[in-house]
Image: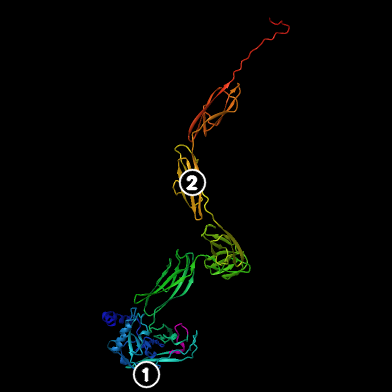
Amino acid sequence: MLPTLRTWLFPALASALIGAPAALAQVPSQCLEIESILVDACIDLAQCPGASEGQNEMVRFRTGPQPIALSELEADWPNNSWNGLVQDATTAALTDSLNATIQGCGWLLEPPAGVIPPGSQVLMVTSTMMCAAANSFANLSDTLYIVFQAPGNTSGHFANHNNGAAISPTPVGAESLRTLILIYLPTGCADTAIYDRAQLVNVFGTYGGASAENDGATAQFSWPGPPTVTYVNYGCQAPFEPTLVSVIDVEGSICNGAGNVQLVGSVSGTDVVSVLWQGGTGSFDDPTSLTTNYAAGAGDLGPVVVQLCAFGACGLPICIDYTLPGGAAPLVTIVADGPTALCPGQSVTLTANGADSYSWSTSDVTPSITVSAPGIYSVEGTNACGTGDAQVEVTQAAGPTVTITPNGPTALCPGQSVILTASGADTYVWSTTEVTDAITVSAPGTYSVQGTNACGTGDAQVEVTQAAGPTVTITPNGPTALCPGQSVVLTASGADSYVWNTTEITASITVSAPGTYSVQGTNACGTGNAQIDVTQAAGPTVTITPDGPTDICPGQSVVLTASGADTYSWSTQEITETITVNQAGTYSVTGTNSCGTASAQITVNVIAVSASFTAVPAFGDPPSM
């Protein structure tokens, strides 16, 4: 139902499209002009069993100033006879099925009442038995009249290439001309198209090859003026010219967001109405011209992607991206293909990246160098925007330094194990004969491993011992002689869990009463015990001790020393443990410790001295009576 529906919905559009090419394109002055021949047609035996090439060839031509009835047209084929054109229910259904495959804005029409209007583009198919699945109309963007030769010819009407099965960049077959003549019978007016089989190109744009590689070979003919023929291959599609967009020339460069590039684009196709350049952060002096100049923008700090789009009558653009080389001075890096620490006799390949050309400190100018001696190797890389540098150090490697790392204690309780992991080498052999980098052991002993790398071997060992039960200790956080109201924190250590004789199970307890405190500590290997005494402390008992007699003569002194407390305060205001006095008096001291205060005193006397004199008679004086 879809083909019929499309025809019913768009009669006005079809009429407009019929008129548009005639109005815009040149109309031949003579009866008709041949425009192209699909010489090497495509067939698909899987979808069209029994299909043959002779049923799928096509000729595109344009009619002149007069209408042409189908019965008034005759073809003189290079091969086969002319069967005449037919238009019936079969051709109508075939035309509808082809229209259903079109994805562009093109359209296929049968000539109304069997008469081709003047100035029309016409596609002639060599049979109503064509394999529609093998000849795509998906990209058709023109309005074409389609006519069909009556069935009967299965062999080819034309002749394919004669260049052999080997693909060649140039033709190798001898010149072999084939001629097609289309004749308007009422006047005898005719157009002749001649092509050379040797010039037919394959899908690669070269010559020769297998049959499938040449499907789609087409000859195109120019008019007006002296006819010329060109050879193209658009693959398995009907012989209309697809729109092709390309960038054919680029001159100039972009560096650091500056510079100008001259761009030349190319567009082919019959329905192109405009082109547009876009992309980058810069500007085009004329973005609607195939030849334009691009001025780099501030954001063009790397390769710049520009796009050339061609807009056809459908309004659907066909675009191609093109990357303009550019950027800044190169950021050069060096990549080594292996370790840069070399054992004797080894080498490493150093490869520079990021630039266009390179110059090494070894005088090499290739991207890669191979070195075997230790040293610092540098390279300077250059591109169109400048230069950049990089360096790498190659060192002398030594044999492995092997270490063993346990994953836990190496003192094991019964039933425990430890994983020993060797590192520092490439391969390992343990004293247990194991060759993995890690082993699990559960017995005491000395375990050794030999590690090997490309430069030699190295050894390491570790001792695994038998662990014993815990050795528990108790540590107080202060004095264990407590004054009334005081407390002390007792902390057990050396085990994993604890039980005190107070029934507490924490590592630390706080006590304020005198007594003996014990704890039992447990680990995986057993238990251990410890205890500590906490006593009751008393206030101080202060005494004063002189360093000599407390009865002193005038001018003498005595040293008084207090004891029995932690700090002291004398009646002399001194706060030292010892004072020196030389005056008579009672001296007292107050001593303090954490439990309180106490006092003592001592008396110091100064002995008084009395003098008596006896008169002595002068010489010669009589003694007194």
Identified by mark 2, the residue type is: Ser
Q: Position of residue 150 (x, y in %)?
A: 33, 92
Pick the residue in front: 377 or 251: 377
Pick the residue in front: 478 or 413: 413
Residue drawn at 64 percent across, 13 percent down: 612
- Do the residues bearing badges 2 and 1 touch, measured as CB atoms within 8 Å? no
Using the rendered image of the protein, determine whether residue 327 is visible from the camera's viewpoint: yes
Quadrant containing the C terminus is: top right
Q: Residues within 10 Å of mark 2 (few under 14, many from 20)?
A: some
Residue at numbered disc 2: 518
From the image, state whether disc 2 or disc 1 is nearer to you. Answer: 2
Q: Is residue 542 above or below residue 330?
A: above
Q: Position of residue 360 (x, y in %)?
A: 59, 67
* 407 horizontally vs 618: left or right: left
Residue at numbered disc 1: 81
Q: Position of residue 528 (x, y in %)?
A: 51, 50
Furthest toward the left, the residue is 8
Q: Element at badge 1?
A: loop
Disc 2 to disc 1, how far (Cα)?
124 Å
Q: Is residue 459 above or below residue 153?
A: above
Q: Which label number is shown at residue 439?
A: none
Quarter of the rendering containing residue 371: bottom right
Q: Residues within 10 Å of mark 1 (few under 14, many from 20)?
A: few
Identified by mark 1, the residue type is: Ser
